[in-house]
Amino acid sequence: MKNWLERLYLSITNLATTKWGTLTLFFSALADAAVFPLPVTTFIIILILLNNRMAFKYILIVVMGTMAGAFAGYSIGRFLWIKPDGEFTAVVQFLFHNIPGFSFEIYQKVHSLFTKWDIWILCAATTTPLPYGMFSIASGAFQINIFSFFIATLISQGIKFIFLGFLTSKVGPRISKILEYDLKPVAIISTVCILIILAVSNFLSQV
């Protein structure tokens, strides 16, 4: 599983450097927010480094892809997750056994987070190592209000990618030089972004 997944990530990353980069970014964001975890932050960083003037366009595309994926994930959870008798559907079994980041244990963990924090967990979902697709699916399965779900997703994911895109466009040249021999800046940028999202979500929870 790990080898084919690494090859897939590498193939998609290579596509990001071609004329299909924007489409790759959109569908990667869609898949990541729906069901299949992909390193979307890496893709948008690569694209902005290649063409800094298109940063705003890339941010818009990744947010649109994320929202489309969130709708797809919500629909899966709402209509394809649980049978009338309360059992998991064949779709769920397939995801649990074939998609990285999806398992019954993770589903239970997300369930407990929703039970404790309700809709607010979506605002802080980017601070967890869990795939956002599980949160979008869980939102549908737990019948979270769809409008609240979309607003929370737009705010949390929008802030994350706007901050990431802005930071990359400002310090892009320096990152480009470092990325020639080390990928650690990607992790650093993601970590800073996560801290910002956590601070914002904590503030919102106290309003």
Image: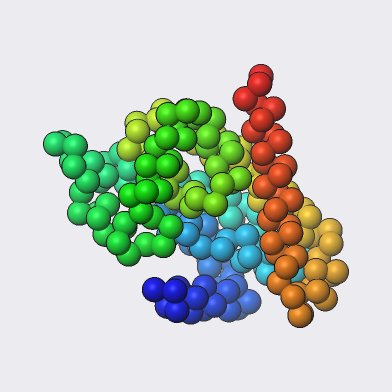
Q: Residue at x 40, y 48 (%)?
A: 106
Screen quadrant of the C terminus: top right
Q: Nearer the viewer, residue 44 or 138?
A: 138
Q: In this rendering, does residue 130 appear at all? A: yes
Q: Residue at x 48, y 52 (%)?
A: 131
Q: Is residue 140 left or right of residue 207?
A: left
Q: Nearer the viewer, residue 125 or 64?
A: 125
Vertical placement of residue 22 versus 163, above or below: below
Give the x, y percent position of residue 48: 72, 65
Screen quadrant of the N terminus: bottom left
Q: In this rendering, does residue 71 appear at all? A: no
Vertical placement of residue 200 versus 22, above or below: above
- In the displayed orientation, state which residue is furthest to the top: 207
Q: Residue at x 63, y 52 (%)?
A: 60
The number of discs equals 0
Q: Quadrant of residue 174?
A: bottom right
Give the x, y percent position of residue 103: 35, 54
- In the displayed orientation, state which residue is furthest to the left: 85
Give the x, y percent position of residue 67: 50, 46
Q: Residue at x 22, y 46 (%)?
A: 88
Q: Is residue 72 left or right of residue 19?
A: left
Vertical placement of residue 48 versus 80, above or below: below
Give the x, y percent position of residue 82: 23, 41
Q: Is residue 122 left or right of residue 102?
A: right
Coloring applied to the structure: rainbow
